[in-house]
Amino acid sequence: MAAHSLFLSRLKPPQRLELEQRLLARQSGVCFLCEEPIDFQLQADMLEIDHIVPVASGGKDEENNFGLTHEACNRKKSASDLRVARVMMRFAKIEDSADAGQGANLGDVLKAYGGGTKPLRMIRDGSTVRYSIPSEGGAPIVTLPLWRDRLSEMEYFFAVLPLTYLHHDERINPRNIGANLRGLVEEFHQKRPQLHVALAWWNPEKGDEGNVNVFDGQHKAAAQILLGAKDLPVRVFLRPDLKVLLEANTNAGDKLRQVAFDSAVKRHLGSALYYERVQEYQHLRHLPPEDFSFSEADLVKLFRGEHRELIKYIVDAVRDSITRDANNKLMDFVQWAGKGYEKPLAYSSIEKTFYSQFLYMKPTDTPLNAGLEIGSNPRQLEKEQMIRLMSLFAEVFFAGQWDAEMGGFKLEDRVLKGEPIPPQHLRAWRIGREEVLANILDWVRFAIESFYAVNMEKVDKGRLMHHRFPEVLWGTLENVLRNIGDLPCWVDTKLAQTIFGGKPPRDFWKKIFKDGVSPTGIRVLAQGLELKSLVTPKGE
Ligand SMILES: [Zn+2]
C-alpha cells in the first residue's frame, strides 16, 4: 500500500517528482526494497513513496522517513517496516537461487555474503588456542582460553569470527530457515541483543587447518548476516565426536523438542546417521571407502544391538532422497512444516500415504552397489519410480490447477458461502486430503498388482517398487488417475458441508470408492469404482 501521508498529499506533481529524485539519490539509484535500479524514464508511473518506519509504529511523516520503491515491490512486501521488508526480500532472493526451490539455509546465506570460503588455521597450546586472521589493521595473533564441558568432556572456546571463516554444517543441521526469520529480524531492529551464541565445531583436515562449521543457531546467525553483520560470535567445539553432536541434535528434535524440527529434517539427520554406520561397517570390515559390496541386511546383522534404529536410518535415507530430489514435481505442492494453506498437501500426509504405502520397510539383501549402473538396484529403482509416481500425481491433479494465491484456508467454508472457486483448484484441495490420497493410492496399488496378475508375473507385494514397471503400466496408472480425477465429487460444491466438512477416517473414503455411498449414507459417486473402467483411457 502507498503511504497515507498528509505530507505527500500536499505535494504538487513537480514537487513530488523532485522528492522522488532526492530519495533516489539518497538510495544510490536503487529501490529501497529490492535494491535493484529504478529507471525514472521507464518506471515513472510505477513507483511509490512509503514510510520506512510505519507511522503506526512511531515513524514520522517527513522526508527522512520516506523510502522510494517500485510499486510492485511495495505491494508484495512482507513487513510494514520497510527495513525489515528489505531484509526479507534479500532472503527471498537467496531462497530463489538456492537449489530445487526447497528453501535456503545458513550455507546459502553465507554464500550470498561471501562467507564460508576459508579454513581456519589454529594451534592448540595447553589450555589455549591461537589463530591469526588478517584484516586491514594487520594480522594480530588471537589467543583464547580453552574450556571443558564438564558433562561431555568436550573442549570449546568462544570467538568472534569473520563470515569468511564460518561454514554451515549441512549434515547436522539440514533445516531450512523458515518464515520465523522475520520475527528475529524485527527483534534485532529494535536493538535487542542476540541471546544465544551459535554453536560450531572445528577439526583440522590437513595440518592445522580446518573449517569452522556452524551447526546450531542458524536462524539468528542468518538474521544478523542479512542485517549486515560481518562477523559473528560462536562457541566452537574442538575436535568433537561428531556422532555425539549428530545424536544430540536428533534428540533435540525427537525427545526434547527444543527446536521445532519438521519431520523431513529428522529424516535427513537419520540418513546422516545411516551413512555413519556404513562408514563404520567399512572400517570394521577393513573395506576401502568406495567398497559398497555389502547389503542392508549385513549392516543390520553387524550392528545387531541397534537393529531397530538402523532399519529406521535406512528407510529414512530412502524417503529423504525421494523428498529432496529436484525431479520430484509433487514437492512443489507440499507444505513443509506447520500448518499452512498455501499448498494443498502436508508433508506428514506424504509420509503416511506414498511412503508408508509403497516403500519397503525392511533391510534388503542386495549389495548396496548392485546393479547401480544398469538401473536394477532395488533402492535406486524404488526411488526413481516413487518420484515418477509422485510427479504423475502432480501433473494430473495439481500443476497449473492449484492456485497458491487463493490457497486452502477454510476453502470448504468459502465454497459454502458461495465464493467462486475454480473447480480445478477445489479438486486439488480435496485430492490433497490425506484420507482421499491414501485411498487413491490403494487403487493405484490394486492396478499394479492386477497388471502383474494378468500377465502371470509373480511379484513380491511388499516390494512392488523394486520391480521396474513397464511403460504400458505407467500408461495404465495415468489412466487410473485421470479417470479418478474426472469423478464429479471433487468439484461438487454441494458436498462441501457433508462429505468434505470434517476429517473422516480413511475407511470413510474406502467405502465411498467401493460402493459409491459414504458410511453416513450419502451418495457420492454414481456407483463404486471398477478397475476395468479406471484403466481404460479417458473418453472411451
Ligand atoms: Zn524494487
Image: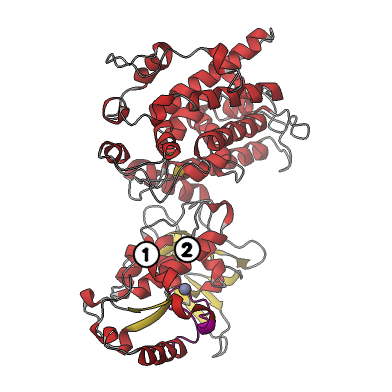
Q: Secondary structure at mark 2?
A: helix
Estimate the x, y position of residue 258 in percent, counting from the top left: 33, 50
Quadrant of the drawing holding the N terminus? bottom left
522 to the left or right of 295: left
Residue 339 point in image, percent of width and height: 34, 44
- Distance from the alpha carbon under mark 2 to that under mark 1: 10 Å
Q: Which residue is mark 2?
A: 92
* Viewer-closest of 495 and 390: 495
Which residue does the numbered mark 1 point to in the structure image? 78
Q: Residues within 10 Å of mark 1 (few under 14, many from 20)?
A: some
Residue 268 in the image: above or below residue 361: below
What residue is at 53 percent from the left and 81 percent from the top? 39
Quarter of the image where one finds residue 85: bottom left
User: Looking at the image, which residue is at 47% across and 23% down?
Assistant: 440
Closer to the chain start, of discs 2 and 1, is: 1
Q: Are marks 2 and 1 in contact (CB under 8 Å)?
A: yes
Assess whether residue 32 is covered by the magenta stretch. Answer: yes
In magenta stretch: residue 320: no
Residue drawn at x 42%, y 16% as measured from the top left: 513
Is 306 placed above or below 81 here?
above
Can the viewer see residue 267 in this picture? yes
> Is residue 281 depicted above or below 22 in this figure?
above
| Kind of residue sitting beneath label 2 | Ala
Q: Quadrant of the C terminus?
A: top right
Instruction: Give coordinates of residue 355: x percent, y percent.
Output: 50, 30
Q: Nearer the viewer, residue 149 or 110?
A: 110
Snapshot quadrant of residue 13: bottom left
Q: Magenta segment, which residues?
A: 26-41
Type of amino acid at the residue the image marks with label 1: Ser
